[in-house]
Every structure is written in structure tokens, then in C-alpha cells.
Image (tube, rainbow, N blue to C red):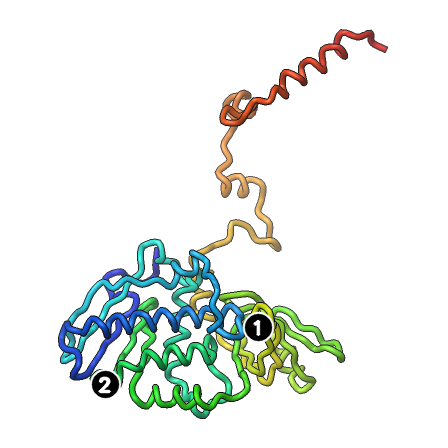
């Protein structure tokens, strides 16, 4: 089940405008370039969200991860002097909101496109230098007769839109050629805080990837205390494991509370827990929830050696061992 009405727009549309394309037409080489660099960009966004310090470091992607990001082109429809490409996901990927990592990856990618990368020190969540480079490469089409690319992500009732045009790509190029010290932002729930003077730390649990341990200064103590158990965005200077490349530490410079993500609220509304730890169900309620049925015959719970497994003679040996004891004199 998906909360998005299947009669609405497909998962993702890309509208291309410019003299090189026409209503329902696009050069094949441009279509291949578009698809290749979109895949590069979103896979790198996922690596950043999973806690990797450098998304350019290649590694084997789990099958589930590849499936969550995979798209099929399902249509090329005309707009007014534009080509509109439709991308959709298979039925297996139509998750309920809040359990769909692929949807969040695409959303972070598009949300970050509107940032002024030339002046902003901290990159938006899901972005690092590798994501910027892949998105910049996608913009190479803008110098070949395409004026703009408008993305519309329709995984929720309110679409997420972003535009790639000449000025946007230029700001990305400036940031790539003049990098600042690695600054990162992470969004997640603040679930642990250690206020020891020698080592003040917090742990952020993002919705995608593993928890990240962060260090903070005394000046941020009040902000940390106020936001325990809340969804926050922390930003600061990143530290990485030199062997694995995973983000292992973040020296936090800022803590910003966020509203509860809409996808988590939706998931909570759909998935009602069978039991609550603090309010346990009655025995009859547990029986009903687990669909326990009355025993009709004693033989139903009696078992023997499984028919599909090798019979090693254990039961026969056990019978022989018992016979002398049964025939022997009683004390």
C-alpha cells in the first residue's frame, strides 16, 4: 500500500526545456547522460546519509539499497515546447511512507539543489563534495541546448520540486573548485547525551544509516538538554574512520530542533503496535493478536523425526538405552 494515489503523477518527473528537445522528443545520448548521473548522484546521497565521510568511495551496494533507488522510465510526454520524462518504481518499491529510504534519498537530493553552495559553509543533509560533483556533471546538458531541468518528486501529496539551470550549476562549480573544510549537517533523533567534562558527546540516530556520535562544547549544553529525544539538525566539522571512510565523529557547532518528520507521523498512523511495553495487553488480547487457536488433537503437538532430515538412528538408540534400566531391579 502507498499513500500516494496511483492515478496521480509518477514517482519522479523531469521536465527538460530548450532548443535541443521538443514535445515528446529528446536525443538518446542526452537521455542516457541524464539517467547515468541521476543514479550517481542519488547513490552518493545515500552513502552520505548512511554516514560515509566521502560518498565517492566505491563499495558494493546491498541489493535492497539498489532496489530502493532503482527507477524505470515509463513515459515521455510533451509539454509546451518541452520534453517531460516520467520515472516510476515497481510495485515492490511502493512502501508506506516512513519505511521508504529511497523516497527520502531523492527528497534530500532535490531539497539540496536550492542551496547557495557558493556562500553556505555547511552542506545540506545528504550532500558532500561527491554529491555536488555528480549533480554538477548532470548539468553538463545545460551547455548543449537544454536551458533548464525541473524535477518533481511526487511521493507525497505535496510534490518536492527543484530546478537545475545555469546559475545553480555555476554555484556548484564554485564550491567544488574552492572547497572549505569538510562541514556536514545530519538530521535525526537525539537519543543519547554524555555531559562528562572531559568528553561531552551526543548520539544522533538518522532515519537512514547508523547512529553518529558527535562532540559538543560547553556552550551548547543548554541546546542539547532542551532537545533530548527530539528530531534535530546538527552541523559541524566531520571526522572519518581512515579505513572504512564512515563518519565516526562530528564536532558540533549548532543544534537546531526540527518538526517531527511527516513520514514518521504517517508511519505511526498506519502501523499500530501489537503491544506497548509500558501498557501490556491482557492475556486474551495477546491470544487474539497472535491468532492462537484451541488445540483440537493431542497429536498436533506430538512430533517425530522430521521426514526431510537424515535419520541417524537416535530414536532407536534412545530406546535401547532405556531398556536395561527398565528391566533392572528396583532399589
Check the picture and name the quadrant holding the C terminus: top right
* Residue depicted at 70% across the width and 73% down the height: 194
Quick check: marks 1 and 2 in contact, CB under 8 Å? no
Q: What residue is rendered at 41% in x and 62% in y?
A: 100
Image spot of residue 289 (x, y percent) = 50, 43
210 relative to 257, above or below: above
User: Measured from the top left, where is residue 90 in percent x and y?
Assistant: 31, 56
Residues 284 and 133: in front is 133
Image height of 2 relative to 136, above or below: above
Mark 1 / mark 2, whichever is N-terminal: 2
Report x, y in % for residue 147.
23, 85
| Rendered location of residue 125, percent (x, y) | 47, 77
Q: Which label is found at residue 147?
A: 2
Residue 283 vertical placement versus 144 (above, below): above
Residue wearing tag 1: 247
Q: Residues within 10 Å of mark 2 (few under 14, many from 20)?
A: some
Amino acid at each position: 500500500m502507498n499513500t500516494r494515489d496511483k492515478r496521480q503523477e509518477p514517482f519522479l518527473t523531469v521536465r527538460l526545456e530548450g532548443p535541443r528537445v521538443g514535445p515528446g522528443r529528446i536525443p538518446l545520448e542526452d537521455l542516457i547522460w541524464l539517467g547515468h548521473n541521476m543514479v550517481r548522484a542519488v547513490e552518493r546521497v545515500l552513502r552520505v546519509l548512511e554516514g560515509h565521510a566521502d560518498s565517492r568511495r566505491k563499495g558494493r551496494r546491498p541489493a535492497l539499497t539498489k532496489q530502493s533507488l532503482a527507477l524505470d522510465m515509463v513515459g515521455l510526454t510533451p509539454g509546451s515546447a518541452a520534453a517531460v520524462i516520467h520515472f516510476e518504481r515497481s510495485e515492490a518499491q511502493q512502501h508506506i511512507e516512513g519505511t521508504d529510504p529511497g523516497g527520502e534519498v531523492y527528497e534530500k537530493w532535490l531539497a539540496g539543489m536550492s542551496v547557495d553552495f557558493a556562500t553556505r559553509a555547511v552542506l545540506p543533509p545528504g550532500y558532500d563534495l561527491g554529491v555536488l560533483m555528480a549533480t554538477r556533471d548532470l548539468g553538463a546538458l545545460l551547455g548543449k541546448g537544454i536551458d533548464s531541468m525541473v524535477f518533481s518528486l511526487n511521493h507525497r501529496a505535496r510534490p518536492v520540486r527543484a530546478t537545475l539551470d545555469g546559475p545553480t550549476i555555476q554555484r556548484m562549480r564554485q564550491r567544488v573548485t574552492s572547497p572549505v573544510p569538510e562541514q556536514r549537517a545530519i538530521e535525526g533523533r537525539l537519543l543519547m547525551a554524555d555531559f562528562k567534562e572531559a568528553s561531552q558527546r551526543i548520539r544522533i540516530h538518522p532515519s537512514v544509516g547508523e547512529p553518529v556520535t558527535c562532540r559538543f562544547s560547553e556552550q551548547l549544553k543548554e541546546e542539547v538538554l532542551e532537545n533530548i529525544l527530539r528530531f534535530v539538525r546538527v552541523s559541524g566539522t566531520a571526522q572519518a574512520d581512515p579505513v572504512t571512510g564512515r563518519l565516526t565523529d562530528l564536532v558540533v557547532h549548532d543544534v537546531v530542533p526540527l518538526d517531527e518528520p511527516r513520514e514518521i507521523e504517517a508511519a505511526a498512523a498506519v502501523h499500530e503496535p501489537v503491544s506497548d511495553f509500558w501498557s501490556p495487553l491482557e492475556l486474551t488480547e495477546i491470544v487474539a493478536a497472535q491468532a492462537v487457536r484451541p488445540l483440537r488433537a493431542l497429536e498436533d503437538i506430538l512430533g517425530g523425526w522430521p521426514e526431510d532430515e537424515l535419520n541417524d538412528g537416535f530414536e532407536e538408540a534412545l530406546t535401547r538405552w532405556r531398556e536395561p534400566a527398565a528391566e533392572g531391579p528396583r532399589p
